[in-house]
Image (cartoon, rainbow, N blue to C red):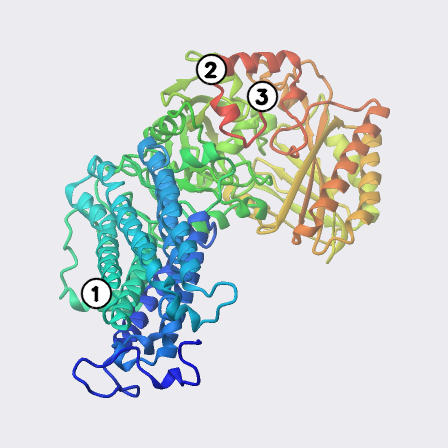
């Protein structure tokens, strides 16, 4: 600076002390302690609250979360700069001239971005939770643009005024007059900040006031949103101090006040923007901590019944709708708002997944379940994560719906359907779960959609005459048998524990009793069904008979079955079990299988499967699972199999429940799964051909870690498929030969092997189809409960059945809800 040649500017004060005292450069009065204390408190709060927000939304961070991360980074940056310069915030007579060069520049360098990104996160949050409210949606976008224009241009202008120009040094800035000229730019930022904060405050209030909820809950929501009022206070305070800079009196002290106000404004913006999610974090995690519960218990002096509308677990009483979502250690109530909970005038729905499309994103954030009701609930211990973990295949477990709805009654299901189909513009995709035992990832679960978990529809009611059983489709078959066995009754149901009632019957259903009664679906006398419009109907041979026929193999293309009535019959314990053989007896087992699977003389009490398999731990084996469904031990029919040298086995007399649990113990849970199927005529030549093809495929499967593959043959004699040929759409009535339904299963652990397993399976099933065609044994039928994702069982029924099914779908689901909004299962085309 030419004006001060050979002068140490760091030894001179900016101005003389009014009382004539010498400058105090060592320990003068300063705003530094206040700034440090306030920064430590507010920045810690902002960081902790933002961390809670990010943890709550960790499984699906959205743009609002990323904006808040950027805003916090800028906040930390500007706090660091202001703290580094905090020694400057003193009176000018105690401030060396050389320090002045950074007084204004440090305040403006990053203040614009630091203010913009937290405000942008709040507007993006509004877009998430009010996505169907057009006023707020448009208003939030206007707010984003206004905030950008209010903060960034002024910040760039201030950089011009507070940085050295070409040929200048930082010292030259002192006498250039530019910093003073830039003060109005800082005031402009302050004005913009006040306007934006007021706008943020008032934008959601009309919608909140219009919510149809209890006054106490409305007050809670208003209080939650009015935390934005503190942002207004902070921004107004900051503006006042910015204006005082115009006087250029005591500028260091005034700059310190501005710095304090900037720290307050920035951190309050971050706290306000993250507080809803953090509140939910506290409710979900902290409130369930043992220490917190113990402390709350001590402070409450034993008064646990402080709220008349909650039960002993803190759940609302006398309500009929409920959802739970990811990851709720504590069930979210509809009036509890967070970045992971969705607010509309009707409901909040937990959301922790990214939804595939914009339209879907909107509707899933506005599923209108009434705030005064709940749709059932799983047990208190059940959570989103444990619900997913209960699926059979790891692929299904890995699918993450936006929320899981667990209805308790058919009326609850109807309400949910009406909600999800009531927005014509934004169709809400959903999945329907019974037992969750399918191998396919999306058969009973949906990424980013709504999963209707029907497991609470689990009633089992036996008619007074014991000739019929009414069963909720959320049951698994072992649960049904556990009740019926004690009454010496049974039904023509599934064979494996864990298999859901709903899934099995939609695909026809194979049972140990099939040769006595046909497909499982053939013995159903009535379905209770929720249609796409939310109506509940019964369908049987007298009412809605076309739909009654279609549901016996037509899949989930028509509605949601909530209850069935199925024929019951007397049934006590019976004989059966399994035997494992060495490969050397394969030919003998094939001969016995073909003899038992007779087209004309099949023993109606016999049930049999023949399998061969390979696992990386056991190598290759042959297995037979056989049952004789009457109280005859070691029946002569199976003597050719029981007389073969076996490696090990378990043949016994027991009840249906134990047989179902035993078959489940032979299955691999919690791994990756793939199923596929073939059908062909039961001959030694066709079976031997499949055996050879399977052995050839084992070489391709061997490199897959922890692989287990099996090919299982199930008899399909006319005694089963032709018993009620007009009762289902399978179109097998014209056949008069015994068929074989073949099921290929694979389980493995590494997702990296998915491609190899699918490719090898496709090659195997295609080769078996070619061989059976060549041998004249091919049958096009594909059993839907075993079909692979690339197979199309409905088409295999033939054009006539497909045409009838399509007509039923048009009649009962004219808008195609269950073919378009429910992507799981095999669809009518």
Above or below, 188 relative to 167? above
Check whether the beta carbons of the residues at disc 2 and disc 3 lie within 8 A of each other: no
| Label annotation for residue 814 | 2
Viewport quadrant of the C terminus: top right
Q: Residues within 10 Å of mark 2 (few under 14, many from 20)?
A: some
Q: Is residue 133 left or right of residue 566?
A: left
Viewport quadrant of the N terminus: bottom left
Above or below, 13 relative to 366? below
Q: Is residue 623 left or right of residue 107?
A: right
Residue named by callout 1? 296
Above or below, 556 relative to 753? above
Residue pictured at 21% horizontal, 56% vertical: 233
**Residue 53 falls in image quadrant:** bottom left
Q: Earlier in the sequence, mark 2 or mark 3?
A: 2
Residue 83: x, y in percent? 36, 73
Q: Is residue 198 left or right of residue 672?
A: left
Residue 555: x, y in percent? 54, 26
Above or below, 38 relative to 231? below
Residue pictured at 82% horizontal, 30% vertical: 686
Residue 13 or residue 112, whichever sits in front = 13
Residue named by callout 3? 828
Task: Look at the numbered disc 3 and give the secondary structure of its residue.
Answer: loop
């Amino acid at each position: 600076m030419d004006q001060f040649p050979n002068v140490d500017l760091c030894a001179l004060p900016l101005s003389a002390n009014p009382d004539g005292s010498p400058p105090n450069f060592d320990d003068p009065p300063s705003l530094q302690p206040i700034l440090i204390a306030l920064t430590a408190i507010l920045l810690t709060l902002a960081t902790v609250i933002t961390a809670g927000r990010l943890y709550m939304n960790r499984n699906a961070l959205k743009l609002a979360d990323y904006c808040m991360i950027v805003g916090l980074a800028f906040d930390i940056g500007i706090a660091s700069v202001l703290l580094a310069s905090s020694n400057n915030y003193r009176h000018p007579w105690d401030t060396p001239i050389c320090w002045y060069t950074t007084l204004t520049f440090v305040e403006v360098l990053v203040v614009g971005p630091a203010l913009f990104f937290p405000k942008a996160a709040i507007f993006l949050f509004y877009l998430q939770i009010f996505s169907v409210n057009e006023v707020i949606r448009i208003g939030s976008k206007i707010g984003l643009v206004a905030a950008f224009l209010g903060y960034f241009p002024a910040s760039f202008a201030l950089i011009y005024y507070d940085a050295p120009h070409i040929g200048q040094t930082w010292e030259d800035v002192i006498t250039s007059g530019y910093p003073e000229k830039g003060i109005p730019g800082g005031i402009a930022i302050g004005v913009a900040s006040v306007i934006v904060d007021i706008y943020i405050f008032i934008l959601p209030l009309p919608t909140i006031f219009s919510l149809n909820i209890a006054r106490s809950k409305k007050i809670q929501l208003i209080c939650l949103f009015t935390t934005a009022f503190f942002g207004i206070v902070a921004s107004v305070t900051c503006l006042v101090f910015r204006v005082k800079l115009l006087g250029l009196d005591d500028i260091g002290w005034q700059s310190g006040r501005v710095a304090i106000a900037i720290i307050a404004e920035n951190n309050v913006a971050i706290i306000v923007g993250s507080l809803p999610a953090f509140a939910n974090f506290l409710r979900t995690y902290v409130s369930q901590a043992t220490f917190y519960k113990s402390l709350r218990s001590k402070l409450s002096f034993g008064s646990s019944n402080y709220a008349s509308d909650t039960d002993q677990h803190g759940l609302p009483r006398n309500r009929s709708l409920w959802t739970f979502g990811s990851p709720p250690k504590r069930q979210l109530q509809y009036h509890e708002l967070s970045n992971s909970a969705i607010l509309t005038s009707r409901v909040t729905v937990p959301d922790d997944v990214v939804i595939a499309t914009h339209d879907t994103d909107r509707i899933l954030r506005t599923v209108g379940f009434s705030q005064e009701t709940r749709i059932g609930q799983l047990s208190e211990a059940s959570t989103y994560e444990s619900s997913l973990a209960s699926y059979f295949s790891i692929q299904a477990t890995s699918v993450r719906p936006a929320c899981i709805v667990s209805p308790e009654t058919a009326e609850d299901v109807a309400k949910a359907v009406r909600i999800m189909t009531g927005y014509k513009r934004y169709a809400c995709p959903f999945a329907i779960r019974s037992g969750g035992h399918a191998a396919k990832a999306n058969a009973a679960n949906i990424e980013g959609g709504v999963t209707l978990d029907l497991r609470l529809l689990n009633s089992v009611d036996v008619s007074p005459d014991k000739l019929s059983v009414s069963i909720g489709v959320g049951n698994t078959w072992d649960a049904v048998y556990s009740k019926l066995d004690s009454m010496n009754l049974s039904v023509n149901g599934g064979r494996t524990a864990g298999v859901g009632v709903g899934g099995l019957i939609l695909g026809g259903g194979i049972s140990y009793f099939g040769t006595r009664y046909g497909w499982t679906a053939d013995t159903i006398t009535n379905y209770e069904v929720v249609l796409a419009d939310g109506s509940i109907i019964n369908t049987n041979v007298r009412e809605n008979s076309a739909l009654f026929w279609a549901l016996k193999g037509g899949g989930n293309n028509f509605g949601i079955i909530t209850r069935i009535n199925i024929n019951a019959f007397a049934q006590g314990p019976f004989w059966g079990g399994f035997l494992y053989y060495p490969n050397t007896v394969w030919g003998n087992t094939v001969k016995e299988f073909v003899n038992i699977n007779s087209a004309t003389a099949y023993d109606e009490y016999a049930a049999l499967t023949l399998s061969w398999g390979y696992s990386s731990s056991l190598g290759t084996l042959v297995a037979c699972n056989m049952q004789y469904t009457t109280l005859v031990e070691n029946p002569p029919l199976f003597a050719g199999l029981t007389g073969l040298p076996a490696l090990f086995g378990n043949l016994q007399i027991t009840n249906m429940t134990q047989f179902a649990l035993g078959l489940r113990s032979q299955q691999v849970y919690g791994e990756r799964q793939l199923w596929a199927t073939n059908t062909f005529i039961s001959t030694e030549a066709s079976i031997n051909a499949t055996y050879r093809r399977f052995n050839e495929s084992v070489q391709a499967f061997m490199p897959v870690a922890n692989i287990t593959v099996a090919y299982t043959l199930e008899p399909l004699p006319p005694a089963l498929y032709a018993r009620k040929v007009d009762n289902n759409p399978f179109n097998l009535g014209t056949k008069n030969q015994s068929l074989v339904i073949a099921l290929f299963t694979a389980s493995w652990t590494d997702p990296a092997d998915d491609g190899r397993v699918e490719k090898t399976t496709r090659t195997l099933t295609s080769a078996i189809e070619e061989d059976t065609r060549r041998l004249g044994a091919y049958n096009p039928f594909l059993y839907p409960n075993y079909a692979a994702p690339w197979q199309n069982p409905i088409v295999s029924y033939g054009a006539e059945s497909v045409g009838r099914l399509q007509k039923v779908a048009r009649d009962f689901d004219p808008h195609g809800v269950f073919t378009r909004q429910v992507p799981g299962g095999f669809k009518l085309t």
